[in-house]
């Protein structure tokens, strides 16, 4: 029985290729979520300022900082997408599919 378990145990351990594939998708999703949260936060900051009557001159610095955060997040998103495409190119040069790097079907479109 132990020999049977040992012979199939590799089926439940993700390969490095699968970890890369799942990891890059997870990071893309995390970045998108952070950008969405940041956009909502910026809208809430503007709406809250209007509700309590904060003068635009007072809140401008905070909004500019939030904008810089979102801009950095968008740059990060572009870099992870570029990384994803680099990995696809590598997959085309080496038979990484056979090594468990996925089929490349769910990669984002290059912009």
Image (spheres, rainbow, N blue to C red):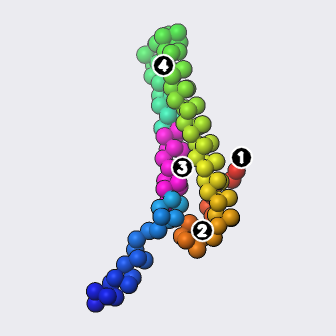
Relative to 28, say whether 56 is above or below.
above
Q: Local crowd at mark 1 within 10 Å, few (<14), some, or many (≥20)? A: few
Q: Is residue 32 magenta?
A: yes
Q: Earlier in the sequence, mark 2 or mark 4?
A: 4
**Mark 3 → mark 4, Cα distance in angstroms:** 26 Å
Asked if disc 2 and disc 4 are in contact, CB closer than 8 Å, the reply is: no
Magenta residue span: 22-36
Q: Disc 1 designates what residue?
A: 111
Tag count: 4
Badge 3 element: helix
Image quarter hosting the N terminus? bottom left
Write down the residue under mark 2: 96
Farthest residue in the bottom direction? 1
What residue is rendered at 53% in x and 15% in y?
Answer: 60
> Separation of disc 2 and disc 1 at Cα?
24 Å
Dot 2 or dot 1: first in sequence order is: 2
User: 86 or 106: which is nearer to us?
Assistant: 86
Residue at point 55%, 26% (across, down): 67
The residue at the far front in this view is 94
**Mark 3 or 4, which is nearer the eye?**
3
Q: Residue 103 or 58: which is nearer the viewer?
A: 103
Circle 4 residues within 10 Å: few <14, some 14–19, many ≥20: few
Residue at 48% x, 64% y: name it: 16
Depth check, mark 2 against mark 4: the one in front is: 2
The answer to whether marks 1 and 4 mark residues whose Cβ atoms lie closer than 8 Å is no
Q: Is residue 55 magenta?
A: no
Image coords of residue 35 (percent x, y): 53, 38
- Observer-side mark, 3 or 2, equals 2
What residue did someone put label 4 on? 62
The residue at which mark 3 appears reads as 28
Q: Kindly identify the residue that appears in the image at 48 percent across and 47 percent down.
A: 30
């Amino acid at each position: 029985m132990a020999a049977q378990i040992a012979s199939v145990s590799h089926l439940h351990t993700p390969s490095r290729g699968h970890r890369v594939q799942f990891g890059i998708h997870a990071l893309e999703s995390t970045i998108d979520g952070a950008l969405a949260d940041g956009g909502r936060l910026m809208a809430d900051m503007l709406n809250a300022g209007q509700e309590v009557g904060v003068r635009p001159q007072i809140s401008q610095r905070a909004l500019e900082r939030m904008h810089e955060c979102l801009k950095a997040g968008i740059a990060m998103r572009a870099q992870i997408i570029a990384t994803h495409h680099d990995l696809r190119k590598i997959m085309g040069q080496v038979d990484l599919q056979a090594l468990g790097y996925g089929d490349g079907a769910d990669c984002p479109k290059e912009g």
